[in-house]
Image (cartoon, rainbow, N blue to C red):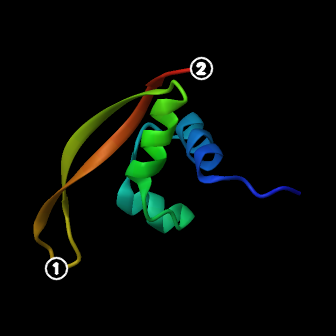
Amino acid sequence: MEKKGYKEILLEHFKNNKSITSRDAFVLYGMTRLSAVIYNLKKDGYVFEDENITVKNRYGRNTVVKAYSLVGGI
């Protein structure tokens, strides 16, 4: 069985989920550079929306992260 690359993993994620943050990508898939994978998918013709959302960090403080959603593509 051939290993899936991060682009394939992320596209599969979007089939089952609305969005993903960098924290989600790290926890679920060990992906440390989500924005780089999104950038490469954009070059391949996929279209994304991004939204800044506020979440609590490990210390209970609010922090802003970007959530990406796939809206179209090949």
Please name the amino acid that badge 2 sits on.
Ile
The x and y percentages for residue 40 are: 49, 40
Residue 32, quarter of the rendered image: bottom left
Label 2: which secondary element: loop
- Amino acid type at circle 1 is Tyr
Using the image, tell me which numbered label, if any, was put on residue 74.
Answer: 2
Q: Which residue does the image show at 59% across and 20% down from the upper left? A: 74
- Would you call the spot at circle 1 few (<14 residues within 10 Å), some (14-19), or many (20 or more)? few
Q: Quadrant of residue 59?
A: bottom left
Q: Residue 9 got which mark?
A: none
Where residue 45 appears, as percent x and y from the top left, is 51, 24
Numbered label attached to residue 59: 1
* Left or right side of 9 for 19: left
| Residue 41, horizontal then vertical, whole percent | 51, 36
Residue 8 to residue 65: above or below:
above
Vertical comparison of 72 with 60: above or below: above
